[in-house]
Image (cartoon, grey):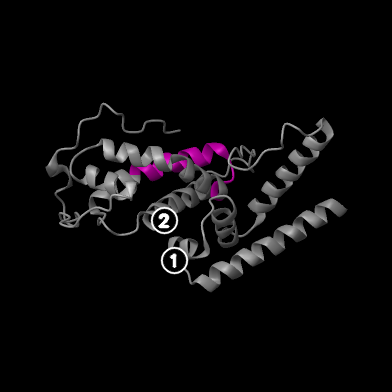
Amino acid sequence: MLTIFPSRDRRPDPPNKFGEAGVSPPFDGEVPVDDPDQADLARFLDGDAAGFEALMTRHRRQAYGIALGLCGNHDDAMDAVQKAFLRMHRSLPRFRLGQPFFPWFYRIVRNAALNQRRDERRHRGDVPLDWVDKPSQGLSPLEAAEAEQLRTRLWDGIQRLSPELREVFVLFHFQGLKYREIAAAVDVPLGTVMSRLHAARQQLRRSLGEEASA
């Protein structure tokens, strides 16, 4: 598994490293002061490697949640996140400041996760869902066990969804994105997001209902 992120001691890359065609031209506008992503992107594109490290720190947990929902297990999700951040580091010099960051970020994580899932089908999912609410400590042992069982069944049901349905379900329920944000990230019409989310919920209800009655 890859484990190395760019360290805080790393010196900025020399300007000629990204001298190939397609490098983003200098940005002459003003970076919005209320957009930390754009500010960090500007720092990185100006030669300050700490800008990229700040982006990674801010979005690492979100990237893991996306990758875990698509990969289905912790190890593959971690590998996918590492690969996604390495690809971002290579691709950022072609990023145009001012364009929305999340759709670009999401597509890189998504592609890395789907490739990882395709290439490394090792597990069915070990449910390391610290980004899903865990049973309250106030529950009795029996209630906690039942809640954990339901959580595991829900996770298994999510993994049985088609990639298209699983994607919008994870983004809406676990990443907290709105319909329009999902549409922009996945690059589909708003109505398609809504219909996929509805279909995912219906399929999960049927799946959980069938297991409960079995």
Picture layout, residue 110 above or below residue 11: below
| Residue 79 picture location, percent across and down | 46, 39
Q: CA distance from mark 2 to mark 1?
A: 9 Å
> Which picture quadrant has residue 59?
top left
Residue at horizontal 48 percent and vertical 40 percent from the top? 61
> Which label number is shown at residue 65?
none
In the rendered image, residue 170 lying in the magenta stretch gets the answer no
Picture layout, residue 49 above or below residue 170: above
Task: Determine the main secondary structure of the stretch shown in magenta.
Answer: helix
Which one is in front, 106 or 36? 36
Residue hosting label 2: 107
Residue 121 lies left or right of residue 4; in this view the side is right
Residue contact between numbered discs 2 and 1, judged by CB atoms under 8 Å:
yes
| Residue 196 picture location, percent across and down | 60, 66
| Magenta-colored span | 70-86
The amino acid beneath tag 2 is: Arg
Residue 10 lies left or right of residue 66; in this view the side is left
Q: How many marks?
A: 2
Residue 143 lies left or right of residue 126; in this view the side is right
| Residue 115 picture location, percent across and down | 47, 50
Helix, strand or loop at mark 2: helix
Q: Quadrant of the N terminus?
A: top left
The amino acid beneath tag 1 is: Asp
Which one is in front, 40 or 149? 40
Residue hosting label 1: 187
> Which picture quadrant has residue 21?
bottom left
Helix, strand or loop at mark 1: loop
**Disc nearer the start of the sequence (2/1):** 2
Which one is in front, 174 or 138? 138
Crowdedness near tag 2: few (<14), some (14–19) or many (≥20) residues, C-alpha within 10 Å: some
Residue at horizontal 75 percent and vertical 57 percent from the top? 207
